[in-house]
Amino acid sequence: MRRVYLDHSATTPVATEVLEAMLPFLKEDFGNPNSLHAWGRRTRKAIEEARILVAELISADPSEIVFTGGGSESNNLAIKGMAFAMMDKGKHIITSAVEHHAVLEVCEWLEKKLGFEITYLPVDQYGSVNPEDLRRALRDDTILVSIMFGNNEVGTLQPIEEIGKICRERGVALHVDGVQAVGHIPVNVKELSIDMLTISAHKMYGPKGVGALYIRKGLKPTPLIHGGGQERGLRSGTENVAGIVGLGAAASLAKRRIENKDEERVKKLRDKLIDGILDRIPETILTGHRYNRLPFHASFCFKYIEGESLILRLDAVGIGASTGSACSSAKLEPSHVLLAMGIPHEVAHGSLRLTLGKDNTEEDIDYVIENLEKMVSELRRISPYGKKDV
Ligand SMILES: Cc1ncc(COP(=O)(O)O)c(C=O)c1O
């Protein structure tokens, strides 16, 4: 059976180059990077080289990169860290209604436990924040704005440059969850006036459980993990050397792919997938913006069916897909992102996310369109929603 993996927003395979870079640090190069001897010096050097590679990918200074245990931890460090550091100055945070749970749950926790006030900016039908809404929401006691770069469920890219300008003008720190975007599109933290940027290795052909937070020089979030003072005191704990080296290798690979415009090939395949599905399957909505979206991302709602039954049928023919974010697929509630975009509950239940990767081919796309067309029409025939003729 053909196997087509189209769930790269959930996670990507580890690239061969990345694995090869990591292996010595799981075998002979095992030293603790905090030790002064030769073993320790080797792993320290590897960490600092990885820091340079990650910094280069986003045009930051290596001293502005803190390694963490992944995207969720970076989001927590950015938001809670700034909240703890700034709560004497103000307790107002602005975010959007379509953020990942690793931002929304942090904000809700701060609201409930520490009395912060959170403004959730609305989005339009494409999932886009209006910078003018941000301008109006900013207050004298606003200490942080947190807006994601590319949406994990619908792929829409937010107007980060404009958002960055507004935050700079008002002197409010901007955190950007870049988990889905970094490594796939050019991101320059200086040009975009980003103060903190979340990066996760496993969304860009690196290993799971490792990430980074870019923190602009001068900003001082309070650490969440105290101990031996590693990572300039911002993230204690003996470093995950192999993981960090893997993130560095993934960053270097991503930089090369972006410079070579390799993502254009993926984008063409994505467009073929979107056009094929919209042409051949009636009563289908493309969710998110048609063009202003992550290059590898396609997402839909098929009216009159349940996304989950589609996922199971696709899985049975070797196709890996998801309904929305991997983490929320266990909950059978419609996605908060789709609802915020004004998509009705019953339509939101028929969501499907197909996210491509560097190894997908034209044949993969043909196979998916062909199967999907058949499955959607079969499911509609037996649908309890009563629409049997589309
Ligand atoms: C936008 C976004 N932010 C944060 C995360 C969490 O990243 P991690 O899995 O590295 O904790 C994800 C993962 O799906 C994501 O898509």
Image: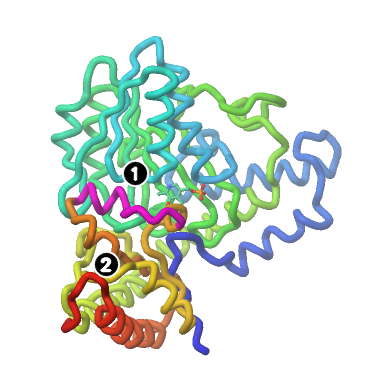
* Residue 95, percent from left and from top: 30, 34
Q: Is mark 1 within 8 Å of ligand 1?
A: yes
Classify residue 133 as left or right of residue 268.
Answer: left
Q: Residue at x 42, y 18 (%)?
A: 114
* Residue 356, percent from left and from top: 40, 70
Rendered view: 192 above or below 323:
above
Could you tell me which quadrant the C terminus lies in? bottom left
* Residue 167, percent from left and from top: 26, 29
Residue in front for this viewpoint, 117 or 272: 117
Rendered view: 179 above or below 390:
above
Q: In which image quadrant can residue 109 be found?
A: top left
Q: Residue at x 37, y 49 (%)?
A: 187
Instruction: Report the residue marked by disc 2.
Output: 300
Amino acid tagged 2: Phe
Residue in front for this viewpoint, 268 or 109: 109
Instruction: Report the residue marked by disc 1.
Output: 99
* Range of residues picked out in magenta: 330-341
Q: Is residue 31 magenta?
A: no
Q: Residue at x 62, y 55 (%)?
A: 246
Amino acid tagged 1: Glu
